[in-house]
């Protein structure tokens, strides 16, 4: 059975996930790890990217909601 995203990156903040992703990229680029481990790290990195995108999408939706509420409030007071 496949792991859920929440199991792969449990409650990581955007910044924590980004830092882990940067370390993975640096390790792979520097050749510090063998090929097989590089592939595993690549897979982990892709999961971190997905996690970061999810966080960013949620933030974008929240900003849109706040903007709509502010615009609605502004129109009512005019």
Image (tube, helix red, strand yellow):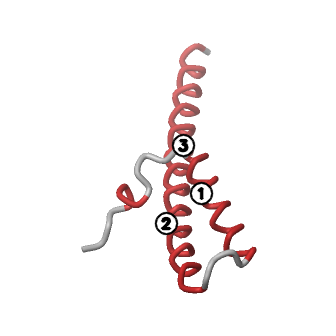
The local secondary structure at tag 2 comes to helix
Q: N-terminal of the two: label 1 or label 2? A: 1
Tell me the element at label 1.
helix
Which corner quadrant holds the N terminus? bottom left
Q: Tell me residue 28's x, y (percent).
A: 67, 75
Where residue 30 sits: x, y (%)? Answer: 75, 74
Q: Residues within 10 Å of mark 3 (few under 14, many from 20)?
A: few
Q: In front here: 51 or 30?
A: 30
CB of mark 1 within 8 Å of CB of mark 3?
no
Which residue bears the numbered disc 2?
A: 47
Foreground disc of the pair 3, 2: 2
Going by the image, does 69 lie left or right of 6?
right
Query: Which of the labelled discs sits on residue 72, or is there none?
Result: none
| C-alpha distance separating marks 1 and 2 | 11 Å
Q: Dividing the picture into quarters, in which one does residue 63 lie?
A: top right
Residue 20 circle label: 1
Q: Which residue is drawn at the image coordinates 60% and 20% (left, top)?
A: 74
Which residue is labeled 3 in the image? 59
Q: Residue furthest left?
A: 1
In primary-sequence order, the first of circles 3 and 2 is 2
Rendered view: 56 above or below 69:
below
- Where is residue 2 drawn, in percent x and y? 30, 72
User: As rendered, which of 3 and 73 lies closer to the eye?
Assistant: 3
Q: Position of residue 73 (x, y in %)?
A: 54, 20
> Which residue is located at x 67 percent, y 60 percent?
22
Which mark sits nearer the N-terminus, 1 or 3? 1
- Within-10-Å neighbours for mark 1: few <14, some 14–19, many 20+: some
- Of all residues, the one furthest to the top in this rendering is 77
Residue 59 against residue 10 in the figure, above or below: above
């Amino acid at each position: 059975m496949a792991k859920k995203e929440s199991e792969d990156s449990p409650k990581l903040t955007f910044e924590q996930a980004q830092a882990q992703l940067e370390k993975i990229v640096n390790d792979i680029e520097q050749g510090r790890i063998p090929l097989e481990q590089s592939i595993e790290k690549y897979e982990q990195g892709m999961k971190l990217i997905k996690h970061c995108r999810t966080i960013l999408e949620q933030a974008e939706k929240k900003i849109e909601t706040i903007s709509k509420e502010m615009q609605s409030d502004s129109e009512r007071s005019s």
